[in-house]
Amino acid sequence: SQTIHQWPATLVQPVGSPLSLECTVEGTSNPNLYWYRQAAGRGLQLLFYSVGIGQISSEVPQNLSASRPQDRQFILSSKKLLLSDSGFYLCACKIVGELFFGEGSRLTVL
Amino acid sequence: GESVGLHLPTLSVQEGDNSIINCAYSNSASDYFIWYKQESGKGPQFIIDIRSNMDKRQGQRVTVLLNKTVKHLSLQIAATQPGDSAVYFCAENLIYSSASKIIFGSGTRLSIRP
C-alpha cells in the first residue's frame, strides 16, 4: 500500500526566510500529487498539483512554488515567507480516484 | 466552490443519535464525490465516495446521498459515537483537459454530547 512522507512535521520560520517542504510517496508509481494548505480552523485550499515529473499546475497566485524533480517527490518552496503563509500543509497522492494524505507540515511564520 | 476562508460551522449531536452533515458543490463537471474525516492535527482520511451516476451509497454506519439537481451532497452517520468527533469535508473530483483535481468544500465540525 502507498505511504506518504512529509517533513518537517513542524516548522517555525521568520518572515522573509525561505521555505522547503518535502513530500515523498512510496508504494505506487506515476501518481498525481497535490499540495493543499489549511489555515487554522478552516478548509483545505488546493495550491498545486502535478501529473508527472516536471509538470506543475498552480491554483492560486502567491509567493509559493512547487517542483517535482522525481516521480515520487513533490516539493513546496518559497523564497520569502509572508505571515499569511502560516498554516498546515498537506501533501496528497491520488490513486484510482482516492486521495491519500500525508500527516502534514505545520508552518508558523513569525 | 471553495470556502476555505470561512470558519467551520459546527454540528452538535447527542451520542447515539444520527448525524447528517450537508455540503453544496458548484461544478456540474464533477464526476465523483468524496467525504473525508479530519481529526485534530492529522491529515484527512477517506470515509466514503460516490460516483455522479449514483444517488446513494452505503458503508459501515455511513450513507452518502447525492442530489445532482440541486448540487447537494450529504453524509449520514448512524448511531454517532464519541470517536466520530472530527471535521468532515466533502470534496469533488473535477475533470478537465488531461487531468483532474480534487476540490474541497466547506468543512463541518461534528461534536458529540454525552
Image (tube, coloured by chain):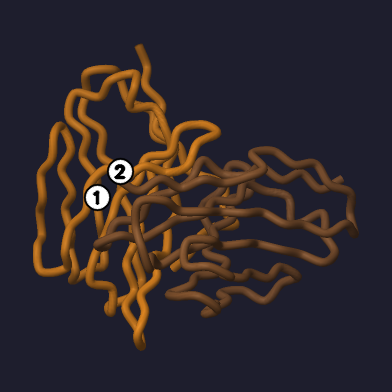
Chain colours: A brown, B orange
The residue under the point 41% across, 26% down is B111
Q: CA distance from mark 2 to mark 1?
A: 6 Å
A17, B93: nearer the viewer: A17
Amino acid at dot 2: Ile
Chain letter for mark 1, please: B
Q: Assign the N terminus of chain B to one quadrant of the image.
A: bottom left
Among all residues in the image, which is located at the extreme bottom? Answer: B97
Q: Label for residue B21?
A: 2
Q: Which residue is mark 1?
A: B74
Q: Assign the C terminus of chain B to one quadrant of the image.
A: top left
Measured along the vertical axis of the image, is residue A66 above or below residue B83? below
Secondary structure at badge 1 equals strand
Amino acid at dot 1: Ser
| B28 sits left or right of A69 in the view | left
Measured along the vertical axis of the image, is residue B111 above or below residue A34? above
Whether pointer 2 and pointer 1 mark residues with C-beta atoms closer than 8 Å, the reply is yes
**Neighbour tally class for label 2: few under 14, some 14-19, many 20 plus, Cα within 10 Å:** some
B76, A105: nearer the viewer: A105
| A7 sits left or right of A31 in the view | right
| A97 sits left or right of B102 in the view | left
Chain letter for mark 2, please: B
| Residue B60, image quadrant | top left
Task: Give the percent coordinates (x, y) of residue B13.
Answer: 32, 25
